């Protein structure tokens, strides 16, 4: 490393120019695993979440470990946006569940976002299978 200090490599809001730290990745994966376990074994009282199966595909955690963004999807369905308000309502309950499962100094506040990576991959796959693109790829 050159004469620059470690703090010089940080961008806005303290985010490292090199991406998340190893600890951030490790904690994010533990939060993802714990959330998945809670979703698998918990019956929610919210009527919008009755018989709804949510999959947590990824969790990203802020550098200060106070906020976690959980990317969620419903396998086989594309209507995950409809359950986001209900997930926001049960976020305090989920945070309490995380505090019982994880040994963290502060349990992060949970925010939910739809995971559109699978939809995007399917669109790209369909695009690559189109005759025009196949023709261009064969050349």
Image (cartoon, rainbow, N blue to C red):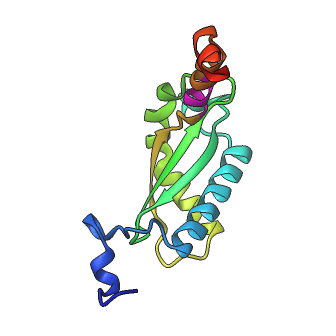
Find the residue positioned furthest to the bottom: 3
Find the residue positioned furthest to the top: 131
Please state which of residues 135 and 116 is positioned toward the viewer in this rendering. Answer: 135
Q: Which quarter of the picture shows residue 50?
A: top right
Find the residue positioned furthest to the front: 139
Find the residue positioned furthest to the right: 41
Residue 119 drawn in magenta: yes
Decide if residue 138 is on the left or right side of residue 24: right
Question: Residue placed at 57% from the left, 22% from the top?
Answer: 123
Decide if residue 5 is on the left or right side of residue 27: left
Residue 63, percent from left and from top: 40, 70
Residue 103, percent from left and from top: 60, 76
Please state which of residues 81 and 92 is positioned toward the viewer in this rendering. Answer: 81
Residue 132, percent from left and from top: 58, 10
Question: Residue placed at 46% from the left, 64% from the top?
Answer: 108
In the rendered image, the quadrant that contains the C terminus is top right
Please state which of residues 82 and 86 is positioned toward the viewer in this rendering. Answer: 82
Asked if residue 54 shows in the view, the reply is yes
Position of 125 relative to 111 (above/below): above
């Amino acid at each position: 490393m050159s004469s620059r200090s470690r703090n010089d490599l940080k961008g806005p809001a303290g985010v490292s120019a090199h991406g998340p730290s190893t600890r951030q990745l490790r904690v994010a994966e533990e939060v993802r695993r714990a959330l998945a376990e809670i979703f698998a074994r918990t019956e929610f009282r919210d009527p919008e979440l009755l018989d709804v199966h949510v999959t947590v595909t990824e969790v990203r955690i802020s550098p200060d470990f106070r906020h976690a963004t959980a990317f969620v999807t419903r396998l086989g369905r594309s209507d995950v946006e409809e359950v986001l308000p209900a997930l926001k309502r049960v976020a305090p309950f989920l945070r309490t569940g995380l505090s019982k499962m994880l040994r963290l100094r502060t349990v992060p506040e949970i925010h939910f976002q739809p995971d559109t990576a699978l939809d995007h991959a399917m669109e790209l796959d369909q695009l690559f299978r189109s005759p025009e693109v196949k023709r261009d790829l064969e050349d």
